[in-house]
Image: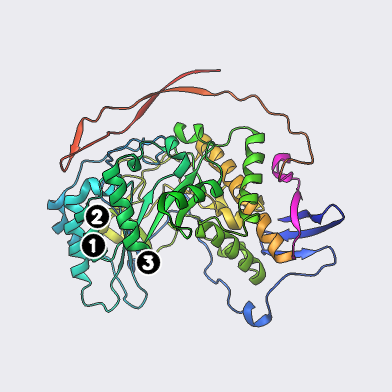
Amino acid sequence: MIFEIHAEKNKDDKKIFFYDNEKNTLSDDTGYIYEYSEEKQQDKKSIEYIPFSKDLPLKKRRLAKLVKIQLGLSCNYSCDYCSQKFVERPKETNSKDIENFMKLFNELDFSEELGLKIEFWGGEPFVYWKTLKPLAEALREKFSTWGTPPHFSVITNGSLLTEDICAWLYAMGFSVSISHDGPGQFLRGPDPFDDPEKRRAILDLYETLKPIGRISFNAMLASKNISRKDIHAWFIKFTGDPDVQLGEGGFVDAYDQDGIDNSLETKQDHFAFRRTAFNDIFSTDGYIGFNGILGKIDAFTNDILKHNEAKYLNQKCGMDDESTISIDLRGNVITCQNTSAIEVSNNGESHLGGNLADFDNVELRSATHWSNRPNCSDCPVLHICRGACMYLDGKYWESTCNNAFSDAIPLFALSIEKITGGYIPSYIVNPHLPLDRQDIWGTFLEHPETPRKKVIPIKVITDKKSVVEGIEVYEKSTIIEGPQC
């Protein structure tokens, strides 16, 4: 698909470029193609995607390079836009399941030369501390002969960290990410930083792991928390570290009604966010702390200059990689760590893809590749967005797609500006794009808002009545939808 891009350095210096998202090439109106030298062109991606869907299931390899272990979905918090909030909870596992899990884990193959990463996921992983600790130690022992042991990592809300747990994480070589939205934490849920003891434990862990590059704060953007620059400033103040490392940094996906409620709703909301996202990076020369976001700009720039074609493009989450696998402690292979073996995907298929005990028959029908989405192939930001969440459908996919476009288009513009020596895109001409996507910053056209029917949900959230390993946790949330208005 060819996109005509109108860009300018200033009001007196304007230029038209042409971007081909299939071949991933950028040219100007003279026909000049922006590219690396022939020597650099040799280093291109070469593995073509497999267009999986429920009719062409996604398979996995025994040789695993990234294993995501789902300990369980219980959490001591019930945050507003949690991706697991409405997921069906399986029966809890515990430390007694470790022995059988290790037997099933041996069905996978591993290579020290290729390396191995193991991620431990919840819910809140430290709800499962009595299971997590012996499990990680058993896995460390399994690979004790490796000169370079597997890399362990965990994402936590930080509320259950103690001095002993922090010491163990350091000794075991864990990388730790703490989920917190900075000035927008009130949108997510409770704030562990309000408790002086928890705050001190988190800061102590940060001061220990930061010098060795093993900690970050993971913040998400939402409709009332749209500035990466503001989030960065908040964490600098919190840590006292001008070089604080921030992870994630993307706009929330709409996994449920709460996700939709935290999404960008009106066209003006989208334009305001795009302008903020661009200016946060452009005006600070990238000093925003979110290295992953800056990495997306660099990766897209690199892929254009190398002409890495769309046929080699993988999914955003990486779960389409056949060497990346998500499993629970029963050895069930699931779509990703945010699902469960008894949950049904938005496309009507189970998130359960099989079991390690019968690995040859593992296949996932719960996800849709970007090439099977109706609009992805016709989108200029395909190489940045990379299909958003691969298991969403219906209104959740529509809202997520809109968020993802507005999240990616400022990065697209920043990359084009970098490649062309200062020309900032302002308008994209293509009949397949809605006008509010062609007019990047909302400055050329009138954009009347379309009245939208909105479901008014009454959320029924259970009290803390379940206990896992001695910790009170929330059960699955439910909603009762009210009348449309």
State how far apart marks 1 and 3 are (Cα): 33 Å
Residue 192, how many percent across, how many down? 33, 42
Depth check: give the residue in front, 136 or 332: 136
Element type where label 1 sits in the image: helix
- Tag of residue 331: 2
The numbered mark, 1 or 2, whose residue comes first in the sequence reads 1
Question: Circle 3: is it few (<14), some (14-19), or many (20+) Cα within 10 Å?
Answer: few
What crowding class fits label 1: few (fewer than 14 Cα within 10 Å), some (14-19), or many (20 or more)?
A: some
Q: Is residue 423 magenta?
A: yes
The answer to whether residue 54 shows anywhere in this view is no
Name the residue carrying label 1. Answer: 105
Q: Quadrant of the N terminus?
A: bottom right
**Residue 180 located left or right of residue 285:** left
Identity, as a three-letter code, of the amino acid under mark 3: Pro
Upstream in the sequence, badge 3 or badge 2?
3
Amino acid residing under circle 1: Phe
> Which residue occupies 24% across, 48% down?
126
- Residue farthest toward the left in the current orientation of the protein: 96
**Residue type of the residue flagged with mark 2:** Gly
Q: Which residues are magenta?
A: 421-440
Quote the CA–CA distance across marks 1 and 2.
7 Å
The numbered disc on residue 211 is: 3
Which mark, by number, is residue 156? none
- Which residue is at 66% across, 57% downward? 414
Q: Position of residue 183 (x, y in %)?
A: 47, 41
Q: Residue at x 67, y 35 (%)?
A: 268
Please identify the quarter of the rendering in which residue 146 is found: bottom left
Circle 3 SS class: helix
Tell whether 390 sits left or right of 33.
Answer: left
1 or 3: tag closer to the N-terminus? 1
